[in-house]
Image (tube, rainbow, N blue to C red):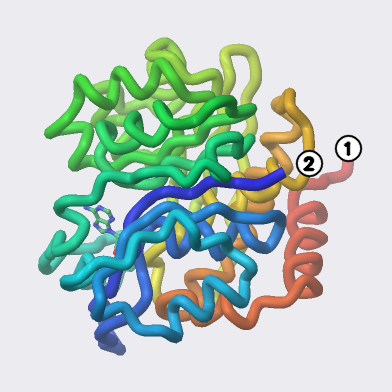
Amino acid sequence: MAVLTVGSIALDNIKTQTEEHTGLLGGSASYASVSASFFDRVNLVGIVGSDFPKQHIQLFQERQIDLSGLQIVEGKTFHWAGQYEADMNKRHTLHTELNVFETFTPSLPPSYRGTPIILLGNISPALQIHVLNQIERADFVIADTMDLWITTTRPDLLELLKRIDLLVLNDSEARQLTEDENLVRAGRKILDLGPKYVSIKKGEHGCLLLSRTEFFSCGAYPVEQLKDPTGAGDTFAGGLAGYLASLQKSQITFADLKRATVHGSILASFCVESFSLERLKILSRNELNQRYAFFRAMSHFDE
Ligand code: AMP
């Protein structure tokens, strides 16, 4: 099995209250594909400019990520700059330069078209649909989105929702999309728009997974070394998708999705312990297993 990931590949500038870094590897597809690669093969679809450092390409290669869907074109790589308040749930975008991303039209190599698990990372819903149109057959389609698309391209987003299995979004986006403050009701309203499942992320408070008949609340790992939350959502979605691929099942059940949610949360908990993908780069299987055991213990209680 394998996962197809599409999204942004970026060079980020990030400022927290204590540190500032420039030219970091970022973007939804970078985080998602490295995260998914802990569980299965990854087919990456994205675009970078001629300024994209070779060491980042090497990282993707070391993680055995298939790069035949990566376009490297003349020009500058997508650039994003953000700043966090002392409360790291509060982030401000300082600027966004689309650069080569402005003319990005994802074209899937023939070898990618039968990928069973599809993760449509955070790009415009029109581009997400464009990717989906090139897929011959998929077992499970996941899409991420953001406030920008809910406001600016809502009709495209509504069309996309009819074609996916799972929508991943954060709590404020779920409220914005449904105009409902109650997250459980908001989740149900999203299911009415098309997807079989919805995962609503609540930052450091974990996430909710809903189907029409089932409900799962996943706690977050208690991270003490929170350095940079950038990419946590993409890492979560990538880990979830990679784990589903590793199951090698054409029919995904709610129980599979619960375990996938825990694996995504574990990957995200490591991601935020450093800037960019530094922590994920050195993450070991043993560390993943230890946190999985912690999650199991955390969710058990005596009668
Ligand atoms: P997250 O923290 O999960 O929201 O993801 C942060 C990543 O998204 C950063 O590495 C940015 O480079 C990337 N990003 C920021 N804005 C956009 C955008 N409008 N489209 C695509 N990717 C973006």
Q: In the displayed structure, would residue 231 be above or below residue 253?
A: below
Quick check: 73 above or below 58? above
Q: Position of residue 56 (x, y in %)?
A: 44, 79
Which of the marked residues, 2 or 1, is nearer the chain's N terminus? 2
The x, y position of residue 71, in whole percent, is 34, 60
Disc nearest the viewer among 2 and 1: 2
Work out whether residue 82 can be spotted.
Answer: no
Quarter of image, ligand 1: bottom left
Indicate the position of residue 18 as horizontal and vertical percent values: 30, 88
Q: Is residue 121 left or right of residue 114?
A: left
Residue farthest to the front? 110
Indicate the quadrant where residue 106 lies.
Answer: top left
Whole-percent x and y of residue 259? 73, 42
Q: Which residue is mark 2?
A: 247
Q: Give the numbered dot on residue 303.
A: 1
Which amino acid type is marked by label 2?
Leu
Please name the residue shown 52% across and 41% down the image.
110
Total numbered badges shown on the rendered structure: 2
Taking the spot 37% from the left edge, 51% from the top edge, the residue there is: 7
The residue lying toward the viewer, choosing from 228 and 103, is: 103
**Residue drawn at the location 59% of the way across and 28% of the way down:** 138
Secondary structure under tag 2 reads: loop
On screen, residue 199 above or below 179: below
Q: Residue furthest right?
A: 303
**Quarter of the picture holding the N terminus:** top right
Please state which amino acid type lies under the numbered disc 1: Glu
- Tag 1, which secondary structure? loop
